[in-house]
Image (tube, rainbow, N blue to C red):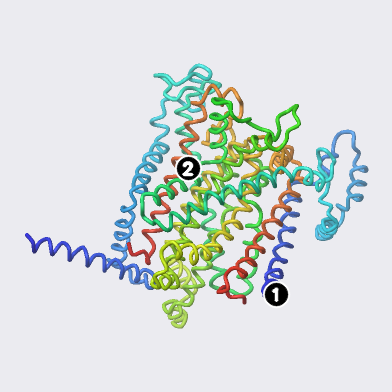
Amino acid sequence: MKLNNMHKIFRKKSAMAVSVIEGYDAENDRTQKDISDESYWQTVFRRFKRHHLATVSLVVLGIIVLAALLAPVIAPYDPNDIAGPFAGAPSKDFWLGTDQIGRDVLSRLLYATRISLLVGVMATVISTVIGVILGLIAGYFGGVADMIIMRFTDMVMSFPYILLVLVAAAIFKPGLWNIILILGFVDWPGIARLVRGNVLNLRETNFVKGNIVAGMPLRHILFSEILPNTVAPILVYATSVLALSILDEAALSFLGQGVQPPTASLGNMLNGAQSLTVLTTQPWLWIPPGLLIVVVVMAINFIGDALRDALDPNSGR
Amino acid sequence: MGKYILKRILIALPVLIGITIIDYVIMCLAGSPLEMLQGPRVSEAAVEAKRIALGLDQPVYVQYFVWLGQLLHGNLGYSMKSYQSVSSLIGSHIGPTLLLMGVSLIVSLIMAVPAGIYSAIHQYSKGDYAVVTASFLGSSVPGFFLSLLLIYIFTVRLGWLPSGGMTTLGTEGGASDVARHMVMPVIVLAFSMAGSNIRYIRSAMLEILQQDYLRTARAKGIGRFRVINKHALRNALVPIITVIGMEIPVLFGGAVIIEQIFSWPGLGLMTMSAISNRDYPVIMGVCLLSAIVVLVANLITDILYALVDPTIQLD
């Protein structure tokens, strides 16, 4: 019995030692992909689970995403159909009430979540791709390319973000895909800087130098050697971009410059609350979408924070 | 040191020129001022004459330099709506915005600095978790939703605070009246800024606490209180400067939305009405101004770094 326990403790300890070594491995050489890659993610998962808030967030976010994806199936009414009384309070038939023209708030909320998540994810993907490409070029080639890209990054970063987005929305007519493109094309500088910094460090490592000496093709060095080693920080940063994109879409749509009605988004559902009647007497119209934004964004932020810790090869915990 | 400052300024100059180019390109994309003239009563010849009078027949780069020349003389163009000069419009609206931004910045620092430092010193304690969770809440709540909640609670339900404007209509105003109007917008701006700042200061402080010189100080046995106050806090000045530098663009952006909700008569409210009127000279004037302010703020941050932290390499 005692021996068995000892054995367990030993296994636990050796697992930890392995994880430390693997963190080290992942930092320096990820080309040898065999079982070590698998247990790297196991280590990440184990570390992630220690953050209870993040684990809860993952479940909550999962439920919300599932509900949003299944909106056509589970929504009790068509989101754009006039289904009940005007501005009816929550009742048995309409769990979250109806809006000023009699549409079911719960159904609209489900579809709005879908739109807001779509905007957030697509904008994040676009800005991450742009940022990664520019960062790789700037960091790896250095010199003139680096200078031009980084100065351009400085310029874009100098304009207050929301102002730039508002101006772009005013010029390019607000609408779902325009908002996605605008958010995506404005939000890349952070990632570009992050990737550039990592590439600058990686360029000095022996395994990259070795590849250069061995005459490996540039494409291989950039995408198979350098990029996999910066995936972790990019992933962490992307979660914060996702959170910000969802917040920005909400703010834009709230101001009437984002996703246009009748398409519901979490932001434009709050738009009605600018009128005093809605704000004071019909709280069911604006509190649920507002709270949903807070929950979604907070869950994403908690997950990002836990990921930062779990993916950090230097985190001893 | 002087050389370092000069070098930073020389790096900032091309960025400044780039900002003016981006600004000009956006303004051109937005549409030409001739569009306002067009109508059934305006002849082709009159439009053509106006085009030449405005210099729009010249190549774009010539137009850009003419515009830049005007800019250097402080002429940002004229509003399409009210025909006032953009610089005078900005001048008359910037006061309330600076007041709001300044107070919010100070309030957010008062919240974030002690909370971040407390959290770092008591890492992994209950208090630390509470502070970090609260800071996540701060950066996850949309400013406009928090504003609506505050208006709902303090204006509609309790009737304590006015919901908008800067002074009560029909009264003289006065400092206390303005202060009452400022409470809610300041809370919203400060709360959302403090969220990310707390975590930044916390992690910067954690790094400082692990430094060798602090271990040495502790090893000398000079006591926890003195170690933190004499040795650690002085080094926390660098992250605090960073935070202030990072907040400037956030403040400009946040002000646009918050001023709109609370009808605060500042630059943000002016910009929002210019955006809904498609009044591009005004919009781009504000963009240019805020970009330059951000650039200068970054420059000052860099220079302050060098002053505060002697270990930063100056080359």
Q: What count of labels does the image hold? A: 2
Element type at mark 1: helix
Residue A123 higher or lower than A116, as above or below: below
Q: Which residue lies furthest to the front in this view?
A: B222
Q: In which quarter of the image is residue B227?
A: bottom left
Q: What residue is disc 2 on?
A: A117
Report the quarter where the N terminus of chain B lies.
bottom right
- Give me the residue at 90% from left, 46% from top: B50
Instruction: Measure the alpha-carbon separation of dots 2 and 1.
Output: 50 Å
Would residue A148 be visible to someone looking at this image?
Answer: yes
Q: What residue is disc 1 on?
A: B2
- Give me the residue at 48% from left, 39% from top: A293
Amino acid of disc 2: Leu
Where residue B84 sits in the image (x, y, percent)? Answer: 84, 42
Amino acid of disc 1: Gly
- Give me the residue at 6% from left, 59% from top: A1
Q: Quick check: do tags 2 and 1 share a chain?
A: no
- Give me the residue at 38% from left, 54% from top: A306
Q: In which quarter of the image is residue B21?
A: bottom right
**In this rendering, the label closer to the viewer, 2 or 1:** 1
Q: Which is more toward the observer, B298 or B205?
A: B205
B166 to the left or right of A42: right
Chain letter of the residue carrying label 2 = A
